[in-house]
Amino acid sequence: MTTVRFQPTGKTCELPAGAELLDAARAAGVEIETPCGGRGACGQCAVRIVAGRVDAANLAALSATAIAAGYAPACQARLTAEAVTVEVPAPLDLSAEVAADPAADAAGRALLPDGEPPSPLVRAVHLRVPPPQPEDGLADLDRLTRALQAELGPGEIVCPLPALRTVAGALRACDGEATVAVAVEETPRRIVAVEAGSPAPGPFGVAVDVGTTTIAVQLIDLRRAAALATVSDYNAQIACGADVISRINYAQRADRLEELRGRALETINRLIARAAAGRGLAPEAIRAAAVSGNTTMTHLLLGLPPEHIRLAPYTPTVMAPGGPLDAAAVGLAIHPLAPVRLSPAVGSYVGGDITAGLLCTDLARGGADLSLFLDIGTNGELVLGDRHFLMGCACSAGPAFEGGGIGCGMRAAPGAIERVEVDPAAGGARVWTIGSGRPKGICGSGMISLLAGLFRTGWLDPAGKLARGRPSPAIRVDNRSASYVLAVADETAAGRELVISETDIENTIRAKAAIYSAFSLMLRQVDLTFGALTKFYIAGGFGRYLDFDDARTIGLLPELPRERFVYLGNASLAGSALALVSGDARRRQLALARRLTYLDLSIVPGYMEEYTAALFLPHTDRERFPRVS
Amino acid sequence: MTTVRFQPTGKTCELPAGAELLDAARAAGVEIETPCGGRGACGQCAVRIVAGRVDAANLAALSATAIAAGYAPACQARLTAEAVTVEVPAPLDLSAEVAADPAADAAGRALLPDGEPPSPLVRAVHLRVPPPQPEDGLADLDRLTRALQAELGPGEIVCPLPALRTVAGALRACDGEATVAVAVEETPRRIVAVEAGSPAPGPFGVAVDVGTTTIAVQLIDLRRAAALATVSDYNAQIACGADVISRINYAQRADRLEELRGRALETINRLIARAAAGRGLAPEAIRAAAVSGNTTMTHLLLGLPPEHIRLAPYTPTVMAPGGPLDAAAVGLAIHPLAPVRLSPAVGSYVGGDITAGLLCTDLARGGADLSLFLDIGTNGELVLGDRHFLMGCACSAGPAFEGGGIGCGMRAAPGAIERVEVDPAAGGARVWTIGSGRPKGICGSGMISLLAGLFRTGWLDPAGKLARGRPSPAIRVDNRSASYVLAVADETAAGRELVISETDIENTIRAKAAIYSAFSLMLRQVDLTFGALTKFYIAGGFGRYLDFDDARTIGLLPELPRERFVYLGNASLAGSALALVSGDARRRQLALARRLTYLDLSIVPGYMEEYTAALFLPHTDRERFPRVS
């Protein structure tokens, strides 16, 4: 066995020679990020070998300087028989802060329109069960089932063993008065919990949006169909890969698939616990969950090997799991028998997050004129349709709009710069943060605002280069690259200046180009233009708002009248919440998933040309953006 | 914390003052038997306090001599602040030996009549699943489900998460050729396992009889409906109580209910592992289980609080669990998704073991003349009926016929004396053992044979007293009590003599009296006599055979022509095996359970008189046994 010591923590572990250094780090409890999923492609997991040696097969991702300084990618280095000491660079600060979703600030916000009665996944039924009789041949469960059938209608009702263990006590504690939580939509209907006495508040449920970068959880009062709290955080899987393809690569080893599953659950369960604690609820009081995510996230959460999502013909294991799931099987730390409903996917690249998001649009009502739905996350997904057709596609935008791949990027959480004004004369920035505190970093809407401001004032050219010729205290030129000082050290929360590099700008432009070219191509497939759109829905975790003028200025969104844009916020989360409380929403979502056809953009002619043309601000074809030009 | 040390093992534990000494023993891993379930009634858990002291609330069950010698009942003694050393007497030898069930010796014995095709709980379906196609919108599970529906007929098929995790790999390993185990009788049908390639042997199943004293397991090839091996052993719950009432008392504390559940599972799983290993099978290859037991055993196995079985109006939690169970939920160490079917009960004292046993009789076929079914275990259960009615009752026989409550009693396992001949002149015994080896103890059929032999030859009087006046080297008189030497030390396996006391004889007579009076009373309820019976089925674990002449001689069975008796052996196990492989048997069993009405003997007038009259050999009313008189 070889001893590995990690600096600066001093943590150690022992593994046999030949083991991957990354596994040694995991075994020792040391976090090393592998944005590319451990393929040796990104070099981000590089660590410095301080003493001893490792076998490093592939150093291609590291610079000659880094190699000379003793760095090796942890995912490519294997232990030898020689003990080794490894220095791990400080990880990215993925602060565990709660995002303020102001839309949910109002406690108990109604999820359904006035007059629409809730029909949640789980119903609490108040019963009076008659006492046991000698020789009527009925066991406790028989009497309970008959009383439930009298309330819920005839038909089978099953009672899993953990609930069955409580039946005898619950029926006798209050003379047969009991409250029974039933998963009413499963076939057969299933008892979730049996409690003596009259109904306590609740039952409660959680809607969960499992994003590649961010996970959001909403706590919901199922009886009132009201949202009580919304919390979100980075998906702890980020350490294993920045995008879905990297995660799929990382998941090729069975133990790493299990690790990814555990990381998603760790984040979800932490958020659930926080939301529940904020309302004084035990997690046990949460009796149902509706979960939406892209197809890869869903597979990883369920522990399903995701590799065929990445390989032609891109076939997932499931669109929607075959049969009811409960929280214990999935691993959610709520009532173990709580039903867990996953939003149905359409294919490997149009997942349940999209069918959930569509529930927030007129497209779900079936009576819509031509509309476009765009969900901006680490992947961009688009759905175009009207009452006659529904077509979806996906593009890999990267995590720039969620604060990923940006040096001082962060999620739309307190302290994130969400709006920037650029001084036309001096080039300096005035910034607004979420929560109005000192800035900690910049989120997606902040980047859009910054780029738009710099571009409008001439401090940024159409190719994404900062104005080197005009002197400004905010612009720093270092050899061939330039950078922009967003906030000086003594203005920021951490006392460190916030700087945007041209690479950060380039990543943002690539993200907007991927999205813009995707909806251009999709419209072209059906011989339509942007002008035909009556509604343009935009979903994504852009904090409080997305500024449509800024988004059009940089060419992320097309030139359309302002009133045609509808910003939905986190539509995957909102749609999950609807699916949790409305049987009608659940049926409409299944129907949407069936109707939606998938378009593989990568095989559409002209894809690369359209993308490349969009790599300018606002676009190579300035005529598309007459107001900006 | 108080330190408790147990001798002779030297094991220790620490528990707070006030804790029960019995819990200290469990915590230290020291086995102390509590035949009465920890009520302080039997004194069998007495231990000697060697150093320190305990608070003993109730010493009623101990003799003055024992109390003077420092003994205290472990179930009644509580720790003080003072450290204590406790001497634990050597436990009963509950050897873990496999019982030879000669009926199952023939490998692969057919369970169903020729021509009846097996219809097991789980079917292995061989499929060719078409490869994934681009853009047909079908996930792996969709293609698998369609292929299964083509074989099994339309209708929903669900796939639990653990099976789903294997689908992508299994469908691609052999070009779509796969073998799928399906629980075909659940609603909806449920996938148990998905494996690549053509069918391996099997699937296999286990039939389990959970008796109060003995647990038996039969390994079954489901495809061929053939029994492969039968093994049995004492139920490890015996340490916590000798009969169902003691176990129910013991289970009043939640941790002890869990302990009882664990003990039953420990025995069952050990037996399953042994049967599987004998056939070279991994427990994972076992894909279904059918379990029968009395209502208390079923509740304890499922972890259901059993106390209301004991309390009027004697209402169990369930007759049959509400919904499908899998092995993981129950705790059986076979394939975790294997369906587990429990035989339906009729009431608190006529359990699934009886409805299983009835499957082995003409009563289950519905075309029977008047028959009586008797299952002799720790409880005796009786069913009387014909094509028009079916009535059942139970009596507490005690474990004497299973070797319990007899000084040198043991199960019908190798080394057990199963037949005895008594020398009319000298009074000595000649013994036959199961397996023909040296005797280790005596089993139920041996006790019946012994009592019959002693009674016939005049060495035992009708009241169960040994002949004190006639000198015999086999009879020892000590003050007021006498005993019978069954085998001298140098003839036995352990080199210790085997002696039967008059208390042992009394326990056996009580057991036979309970059973005989029960069927007398039941016949009287329907105004019939023994003569009206066309068949008298006897079930129970009496090793190779029960000698009907001996049983009639001691008054256990009535005087009826020999040919009306049918010995079934362990009918609960045999019926479970039928339920495992035959859908017809499963339907008939459910119908039987519905038809059967329960008679509570304890409220039938004349019950005590009838019982007391049967406490003689063969009976107070000698006219009932004309051949014996």
Image (cartoon, coloured by chain):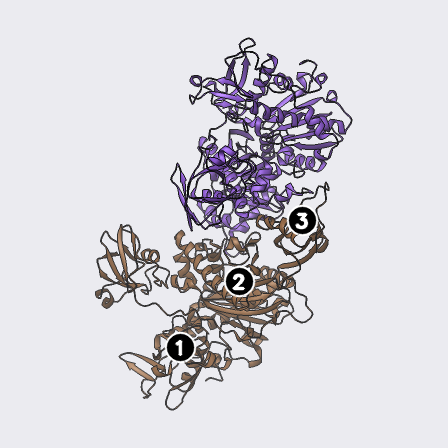
Chain colours: A purple, B brown
Q: In the image as oriented, which residue stretches furthest toward the top?
A: A425
Callout 3 secondary element: loop
Label located before the other in sequence (3 or 1): 3
Secondary structure under tag 1 reads loop
| Residue B17 left/right relative to B354 | left
Residue that numbered label 2 is attached to: B292
Say yes or no: labels 2 and 1 on the same chain. Answer: yes
What residue type is disc 3 on? Answer: Glu
Task: Decide which of tag 2 and tag 1 comes sooner along the chain.
Answer: 2
Residue B135 visible in rendering:
yes
The mark lying in front, picked from 3 and 2, is: 3
The foreground one among B415 and B209 is B415
Q: Is residue B521 visible?
A: no
Task: Tell me residue B248's x, y (percent).
Answer: 42, 58
Mark 1 highlights which residue?
B440
Quarter of the image where one finds residue A494: top left
| Circle 2 Cα neighbour tier, 10 Å, few/some/many (<14 / 14–19 / ≥20) | many
**How far across and down, in percent of the image, does residue A248 sit?**
59, 41
Between B490 and A405, the one nearer to me in the picture: A405
Kindly report which numbered mark, 2 or 1, lies closer to the viewer in this rendering: 1
Of the pair A240 and A569, the residue shown nearer to us: A240
Element at badge 2? strand
Residue that label 3 marks: B156
Tell me what residue is drawn at x 35 percent, y 74 percent. B503
Q: Earlier in the sequence, mark 3 or mark 2?
A: 3
Are circles 3 and 1 on residues that touch, CB within 8 Å?
no
Q: Which chain letter goes with mark 3?
A: B
In this rendering, is residue B288 above or below A157?
A: below
Q: CA distance from mark 3 to mark 1?
A: 56 Å
